[in-house]
Image (cartoon, helix red, strand yellow):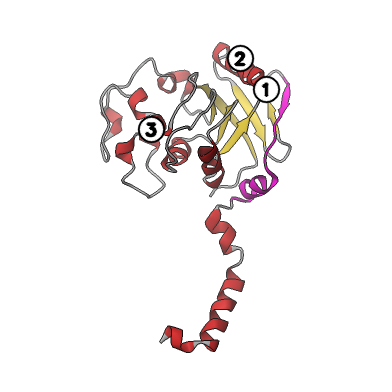
Amino acid sequence: MKPFTVLDGLAAPLDRANVDTDAIIPKQFLKSIKRSGFGPNLFDEWRYLDRGEPGQDCSSRPRNPDFVLNQPRYQGAQILLTRDNFGCGSSREHAPWALEDYGFRVLIGPSFADIFFNNCFKNGLLPIVLPAAEVDELFRQCEANEGYRLTVDLPAQTIGRPDGVKIPFDVDQFRKECLLNGWDDIGLTLRHADRIRAFEAQRRAEHPYYFA
């Protein structure tokens, strides 16, 4: 998992509440567990005018010109502004995989579904919960100003707007440490690799018949 410290990134506004995980990555793409390659199918039913299938070349598919992420001004966005209850529905981990593979590192909204919220941290995404009024203002500024960028400083726990305003945000300290160091669950376990190897060697010596 890539460490997260400070991100200066283009923001894109997804002005829809209750976006569920089937909208984020439709069910037909769940056959793969590779954790990569899902970006082209993020919001598949909204981005394209046809039905997407696994393994399909998305470069020639007809795109929906009205969908926000298809607009030229939001190409390369790394910060997604969301509305209430983003990531609701099933607990599929493919949803944060698709968002991260597309290029997003930060999600900002008034609320997120619990399981999705936890899955984001485990996959290198930073979901930030702000009061609804703060989110409304970010949407307003983003839609009014092309090329709208935000600076998300995880160590300082602030979001810097182009007008100089800095918005503080809360984050669990253990999750913060994991993001700063790029530790997913496997990375956390591997920090204790020497102790694990020592335990295995001792167990093999004490109970060799287990390993015959």
Q: Secondary structure at mark 1?
A: loop
Question: Image quadrant for the C terminus?
Answer: bottom left
Query: Counting other residues with Cα less than 10 Å from the Cα at mark 1, is it few (<14), some (14-19), or many (20 or more)?
Result: some
Q: Residue 200: where, in percent of width, then height?
A: 54, 78
- Disc 3 from disc 1: Cα separation: 31 Å
| Range drawn in magenta | 164-182
- Disc 1 from disc 2: Cα separation: 9 Å
Dot 2 corresponds to which residue? 141
Asked if marks 1 and 2 touch (Cβ < 8 Å), the reply is yes
What's the residue type where badge 3 is placed?
A: Asp
From the viewer's perspective, is 137 left or right of 50?
A: right
Query: Which residue does the image show at 55% across and 88% down from the upper left?
Result: 206
Dot 3 corresponds to which residue? 22
Q: Which circle, 3 or 2, is nearer the viewer?
A: 3
Asked if marks 3 and 1 touch (Cβ < 8 Å), the reply is no
Q: Secondary structure at mark 2?
A: helix
What's the residue type where badge 2 is placed?
A: Gln
Dot 1 corresponds to which residue? 161
**Quarter occupied by residue 156:** top right
Q: Secondary structure at mark 3?
A: helix
Is residue 180 highlighted in magenta? yes
**Quarter occupied by residue 27:** top left
What's the residue type where badge 1 is placed?
A: Arg
Residue 45, above or below 6: above
Query: Which residue does the image show at 71% across and 26% down from the upper left?
Result: 167
Query: Which residue does the image show at 61% across and 63% down from the upper left?
Result: 191
In this view, the residue in front, 12 or 8, is: 12
Q: Residue 21: where, in percent of width, then height?
A: 42, 34
Q: Residue 128: where, in percent of width, then height?
A: 62, 32
